[in-house]
Amino acid sequence: MLKIFNTLSRKKEIFKSVKERGARSKKEIGLYTCGPTVYNYAHIGNLRTYVFEDILRRTLESVRYKVKHVMNITDIDDKIIHGAQKEGKNIFEFTKIYEKTFFEDLNKLNIKKAWKYPKATVHIKEMIQLVKELLDKKLAYVAENGVYFDISRFKKYGKLSGISKLGQNIGMMKSRILTDEYSKANAQDFALWKFKKDGEPSWKAPFGEGRPGWHLECSAMSMKYLGKSFDIHAGGVDLIFPHHENEIAQSEGATGKKFAKYFLEGEHLLVAGEKMSKSKGNVFTLRDIEKRKVSPLAFRYFVLGAHYRSKLNFTWDALWASQRAFLRLYEVVRIIKKQGSRDKGQGKAYRNVEILKYRKMFKSALFDDLNTPKALAVLWNFIKNCSKFTYTDALKLLYEFDEVLGLGFKEVKLSNIPQIILNLVQKREECRREKKWKEADEIREKLKQKGFIIEDTSKGPKLSPTSPLI
Ligand code: AMP
Ligand code: ZN
C-alpha cells in the first residue's frame, strides 16, 4: 500500500488512481510535474526537486503503474524576454542552450525521461481556448493590461495553500498583478493573458494580442495530455502558492471537475539556511559540482539522504561525505559483481526468506511517503549482511533496489582502472620485455604515487588500488 502526503488534505493518503474503478487501463496514471523556465542553467535546488519527482515516478512504476509523465518547459516569460533582449537574440535562440543543458543534467542524474515535454510556445491555441472558457463563465475579466482571473468568483480558491481570501477585500481591490511571482502573502487576481508590449513576442487572440501567464501554461498543457482530471501534480514547495493554487482555480473553474487528485511538493535545498535561488545568487549548478570532482550521481545520493518533505542544507562538506559513501557503495557493488561472475550456484544456500525480509523493509520505507533515507538505511543494512547470500542473489536484490534509487548499479564497471594507468602498465611491460629495468621500476613507482600497486605474477602483471575509493 503506497502512502503519499497530499497537500490538498495535509495528510498521508493511500494512493489510488483516478481510474482505479472499472477503467480498462486502471494501471495507467497521469503525473504532471512543473518543469524549468529555461532562462538560465538549472541549479542543484531545481535538480533536487526533479530527483524527488523521479523517485516518485519510479516508486509508482515499482507497483506496476504505467506512469504517463508530463513535464512542461516554460519557454516564454518575463525573465526569458529580458534575457533575450539583453543578448540581442530572439527567445528561441536564447532558450536553446538552457534547454539542452537541462536534458543533459537529467541524463547525468539518471532521471527517467518524461513521456512528453510540452513547450508553452507550442500550446498557445489551447491556452487561448482556456481563457475563452473562463471569460464565458465570468471567472475572468478583461482589464487594461491583460485578462485576469477573478478569484472572488471561485469559491474554492485557497483550498491547496490554505490562503484566505477574507480580509483582502479582493472584489473591491481587483489587484492587477502582471508578474507571475507576486507576494506570497496576498491572494490576488492574477494574469491569465498579458497584452502585447512593444518589442515583446505576442500571439493574436480574440480578447487581444498578447502572451500567456505562467500559471495558465500548466493548466492548459497538463489537461491536454492527461485529461481534465488526473492523478498527481508535483513540484517544489514554492509552487503551492500562487502557482498550483492558481492552476486549480483556472482548471476547475473551466471544467467544473476536480483537477489533480494529489498534490506533492518537495522541500527546498538551502544554502546557509536560505532557499537556493537564482534571484539570491547563491546557486550552484551540476557543472559546478562536477568541476569539484563530485559525480552527479553522488549528488543524487546526497538528495536521497533527506526525506523530500524536509529541508536540506547544502554544504560542500556534506556533499563530499555523500560522495565518499556513494563510492563505498560502488566498491561493494563492484566486488559483488566480480564475485558474482564466479558464483556457479554452489555458493551459500539461497536465503529466500531473508531476501524477502529486506525487500519488504525497502518497500515499506518507500511506500511510507517515499522515505528514501530509510530505504538507504535498509540498503546499507543489507550490504552489511550480504555475505549470508550468494553473490548472484545479493546482486539481484541490489539491482532491484536500484530500479527505484537510480544510482546506476548496473553501470558499475568491473574494472575501475583509468585508461592512463592501463597505459602505464602496458609501457612497463614493454620496458620489461626490452630489459629496460630502470625505466620499468620508475613506472612502478609512478603507479604507486597514483594509488596502484603492481605485482608481477605468472599470469602477468596484477594491479591493485591502494584505496577502495579509487
Ligand atoms: P523554476 O525553474 O524556478 O520554475 O523551478 C523549477 C523547479 O525547481 C520547481 O519545481 C521549483 O519549485 C523547484 N525549486 C526552485 N528552487 C528550489 C530549491 N532551492 N530547492 C528545491 N527545489 C527548488
Ligand atoms: Zn506549473
Image: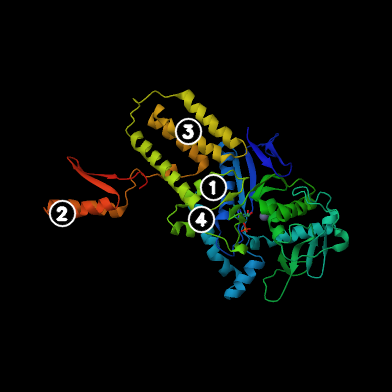
Gap between marks 1 and 2 measured at Cα? 48 Å
Disc 1 or 3, which lies upstream in sequence?
1
Q: Regarding mark 2 in the picture, which secondary structure is present there?
A: helix
The quarter of the displayed image where residue 283 is located: bottom right
* Residue 381, label in figure: 3
* Residue 105, label in figure: 4
Disc 4 or 1, which lies upstream in sequence?
4
Q: Are marks 4 and 3 in contact (CB under 8 Å)?
A: no
The image quadrant in which ligand 2 is located: bottom right
Q: Which residue is mark 1?
A: 303
Front: mark 4 or 1 = 1
Relative to residue 299, is residue 79 depicted above or below?
below
Disc 2 or 4, which lies upstream in sequence?
4
* Within-10-Å neighbours for mark 3: few <14, some 14–19, many 20+: few
Residue 466 in the image, given as x and y percentages of width and height: 30, 45
Q: Which residue is mark 2?
A: 431
Relative to residue 272, is residue 16 depicted above or below?
above
Front: mark 3 or 2 = 3
Q: Are marks 1 and 3 in contact (CB under 8 Å)?
A: no
